[in-house]
Image (cartoon, rainbow, N blue to C red):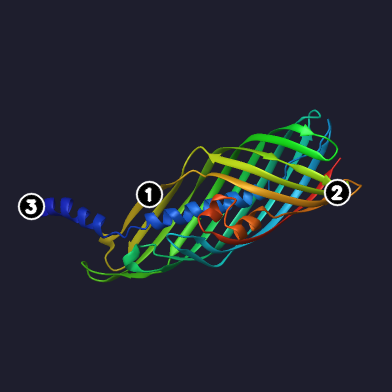
């Protein structure tokens, strides 16, 4: 009986103590990745401006980005960490002031991250990482001030997103007090996120064929993402285990900038430079404020009539 009690009480306690805690740094890494994703998704937001009743607009937004650092404090360095994004959307003017819009955007990123995922005592560990996000945004805008050359619309809408994330650290040797063993781990999660978004734009037409539009968009998710860490002790299965943790909801304001050329036939070509400028200046969105070092190229191919 005493032996059984020992197994029931002592072994689980030892197991809990010896399973490596990956949640702290991993949670910060995934949170920062979410902020990067929100920054890229905000670049797919092409606010409809200078509209009149009955106007329609459609656009296609391809993008590419590369991150060299995911965050500071703790330092999470990236190696060959790249991603692509793709967005499409449209707007319709219900009146000279009021319009509606819908946007479908997706992105994925993958590469290697280096950080102390098992805690500071284990040193930096390289991990392969994959993250994807699909987002649908819809809402309405109202132009609070407009003339032939200036348009100042405000926007309010809702979004639904589906995320999928996977982080696999390299195998490490876990030290005593139990005999040294090799440990594998995998952190993964997926699910749906609901949120709200709003923003304001200031669009300027120059010489009737150049349009410059700085804008601000704020995104707030209403629920948390879920992640699960599975730890496998290759030599002592008894000391394997699982951990679950939540990812904080995205709550971030982001600056954007669109610079484009408008043709007489309704076609337009623009460059989105918000994420790039924010990364260079070190502010402008939550990701860069956390120390993200990222380069991005985002284009807009549009048609209005």
Q: CA distance from mark 1 to mark 3?
A: 32 Å
Q: Which residue is pictured at 34% across the width and 54% down the height? A: 242
Q: From mark 2 to mark 3, how far is it between C-alphas?
A: 81 Å
On the image, numbered disc 1 is attached to which residue?
244
Q: Is residue 88 visible?
A: yes
Q: Going from the N terminus, do you reach mark 2 or mark 3 first?
A: 3
Q: Which residue is mark 2?
A: 267
| Residue farthest to the right, as pictured | 264
Q: In this figure, which residue is indicated by the disc labeled 3?
A: 2
* Residue 36 occupies quadrant: bottom right
Does dot 2 land on a helix, a strand or a loop? Answer: strand
Mark nearer the N terminus (2 vs 1): 1
Instruction: Indicate which disc, 1 or 3, sits on the residue closer to the N terminus.
Output: 3
The image quarter containing residue 236 is: bottom left
Residue at left offset 77%, top offset 48%: 212
Q: What is the spatial separation of the Cα atoms under label 2 and label 1, in whole angstroms?
A: 49 Å
Around disc 3, counting alpha carbons within 10 Å, would you say few (fewer than 14), some (14 to 19), or many (20 or more)? Answer: few
Q: Indicate the secondary structure of the residue bearing disc 1.
A: strand
* CB within 8 Å, label 2 to label 3: no
């Amino acid at each position: 009986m005493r032996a059984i009690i020992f197994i029931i009480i002592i072994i689980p306690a030892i197991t809990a103590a010896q399973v490596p805690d990956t949640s702290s740094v991993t949670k910060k890494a995934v949170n920062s990745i979410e902020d990067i994703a929100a920054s890229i998704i905000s670049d797919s937001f092409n606010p409809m401006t200078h509209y009149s009743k009955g106007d329609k607009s459609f656009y296609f937004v391809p993008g590419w980005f590369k991150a060299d650092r995911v965050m500071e404090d703790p330092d999470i360095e990236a190696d060959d960490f790249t991603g692509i994004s793709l967005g499409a959307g449209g707007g319709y003017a219900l009146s000279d002031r009021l319009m509606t819009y819908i946007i479908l955007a997706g992105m994925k990123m993958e590469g290697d991250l280096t950080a102390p995922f098992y805690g500071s005592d284990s040193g930096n560990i390289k991990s392969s990482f994959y993250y994807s996000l699909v987002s649908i945004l819809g809402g309405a805008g109202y132009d609070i001030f407009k003339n032939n050359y200036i348009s100042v619309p405000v926007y309010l809408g809702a979004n639904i997103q589906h995320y999928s994330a996977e982080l696999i650290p390299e195998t490490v040797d876990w030290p005593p007090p139990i005999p040294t063993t090799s440990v594998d781990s995998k952190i993964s999660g997926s699910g749906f996120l609901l949120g709200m978004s709003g923003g304001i734009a200031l669009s300027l037409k120059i010489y009737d064929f150049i349009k410059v539009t700085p804008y601000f968009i704020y995104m707030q998710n209403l629920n948390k993402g879920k992640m699960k860490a599975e730890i496998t002790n290759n030599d002592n299965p008894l000391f394997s285990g699982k951990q679950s943790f939540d990812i904080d909801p995205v709550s971030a304001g982001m600056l954007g900038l669109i610079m484009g050329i408008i043709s007489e036939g309704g076609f337009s070509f623009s460059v989105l430079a918000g994420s790039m400028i924010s990364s260079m200046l070190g502010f402008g969105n939550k990701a860069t404020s956390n120390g993200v070092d990222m380069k991005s190229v985002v284009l807009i191919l549009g048609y209005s009539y």
